[in-house]
Image (cartoon, rainbow, N blue to C red):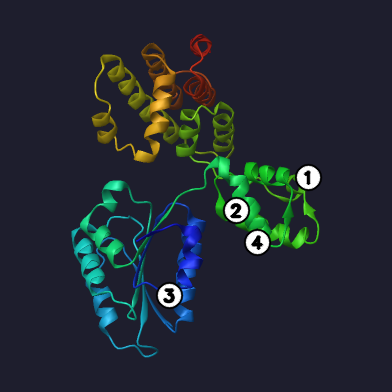
């Protein structure tokens, strides 16, 4: 059974399922969803929790043997299995299928947390077995256009009365960092209780805790958001993020989009290229739109820009590599031909 994170509380009111798989890359929602399951287990009289951190060389038999031992506290246990790699391997796959086959209502509760799993992984035998035995909860990051509404709901749940402009301002400050959002809302609940929260309050009371990384940098450019991409680049620069990683991420994406654009011009099937480069279904539309934004000649220019960025990063050419990063981001985001001439000039 599939379940959305926002439905977990209502679901738990009707009783615990024997198996839960929580998967996603948004730490706050994964943490709160998993904690809701743990709290429900405790309320159901399951006082003993066995935690298993799966790493290289992990003994999967220890989960089964641990659940078979008699409990000193209750007849039921919560088996809390954490798989940070998201890849249980052959031994782990067999163990998870075995645990799913043994799961039954009123027995032990199996809680598994993993990073985001792609469509192919969710179609494996072990993932299907967990789905059939209990509940699979996929956690997705909150989309940018939904972030102000998400913040509004969370602030009101904390007893605050935010103005719409305050939610937009807070979204701009904590963009991409839900843990920071939760912390800032707790602080606002102490400082602004009993009155409306304004954009000025956010400006004065909330730190700029935006967490940016190279993947968000690239995706912002692909989405056509030049201003946001440049802001992320400034943040990465101020945090002394390693330039080789930034250059690698941009170059990898430009190479892919250049190949896709050339294949489109030839009338070739793009799906094998997307599959071979492990482009997730959720990103295919983003990649397709970005690829069509530039002509094959412009993508060739972008590739030349990546080569120049590589020389700047390695010190083989004089200049500021971060300016070249900015140029590439704006070119990818806008496809503006004038930027190609600007790129050759600087």
Q: Dot 3: few (<14), some (14–19), or many (≥20) neighbours within 10 Å?
A: few
Which labelled disc corresponds to residue 180? 2
What secondary structure is found at the residue carrying circle 4?
helix
Q: CA distance from mark 3 to mark 4?
A: 24 Å
Relative to 182, is 342 above or below?
A: above
The foreground one among 166 and 90 is: 166
Q: CA distance from mark 3 to mark 2?
A: 32 Å
Question: Earlier along the polypeptide chain: callout 3 or callout 4?
Answer: 3
Mark 4 and mark 1 in contact (Cβ < 8 Å)? no
Q: Farthest front residue?
A: 14
Question: Earlier along the polypeptide chain: callout 3 or callout 1?
Answer: 3
Query: Which is more foreground, mark 2 or mark 1?
Result: 1
- Write down the residue under mark 1: 200
Q: Residue at x 47, y 52 (%)?
A: 26
Q: CA distance from mark 2 to mark 4?
A: 17 Å
Mark 1 and mark 2 in contact (Cβ < 8 Å)? no
């Amino acid at each position: 059974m599939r379940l959305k994170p926002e439905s977990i509380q209502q679901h738990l009111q009707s009783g615990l399922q024997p198996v839960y798989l929580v998967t996603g890359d948004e730490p706050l929602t994964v943490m709160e969803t998993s904690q809701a399951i743990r709290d429900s287990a405790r309320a159901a009289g399951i006082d003993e929790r066995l935690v298993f951190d799966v790493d290289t060389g992990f003994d999967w038999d220890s989960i089964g043997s641990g659940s078979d031992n008699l409990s000193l506290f209750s007849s039921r246990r919560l088996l809390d299995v954490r798989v940070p790699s998201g890849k249980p391997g052959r031994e782990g796959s067999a163990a998870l299928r075995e645990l799913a086959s043994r799961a039954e209502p009123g027995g032990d509760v199996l809680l598994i947390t993993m990073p985001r799993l792609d469509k192919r992984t969710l179609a494996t035998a072990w993932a299907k077995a967990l789905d059939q035995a209990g509940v699979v909860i996929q956690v997705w990051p909150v989309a940018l256009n939904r972030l102000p509404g998400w913040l509004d709901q969370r602030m009101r749940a904390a007893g605050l009365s935010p103005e719409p402009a305050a939610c937009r301002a807070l979204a701009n400050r904590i963009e991409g960092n839900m843990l920071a959002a939760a912390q800032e809302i707790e602080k606002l609940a102490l400082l602004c209780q009993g009155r409306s929260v304004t954009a000025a309050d956010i400006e004065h009371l909330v730190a700029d805790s935006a967490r940016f990384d190279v993947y968000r940098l690239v995706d912002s450019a692909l989405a056509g958001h030049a201003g946001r991409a440049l802001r992320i680049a400034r943040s990465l620069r101020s945090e002394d993020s390693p330039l080789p990683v930034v250059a690698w991420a941009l170059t990898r994406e430009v190479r892919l989009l250049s190949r896709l654009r050339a294949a489109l011009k030839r009338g070739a099937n793009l799906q094998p290229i997307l599959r071979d480069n492990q482009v997730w279904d959720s990103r295919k539309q983003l990649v397709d739109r970005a690829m069509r934004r530039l002509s094959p000649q412009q993508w060739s220019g972008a590739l030349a820009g990546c080569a120049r960025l590589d020389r700047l990063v390695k010190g083989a050419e004089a200049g500021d590599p971060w300016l070249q990063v900015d140029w590439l981001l704006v070119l990818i985001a806008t496809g503006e031909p004038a930027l190609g001439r600007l790129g050759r000039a600087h």
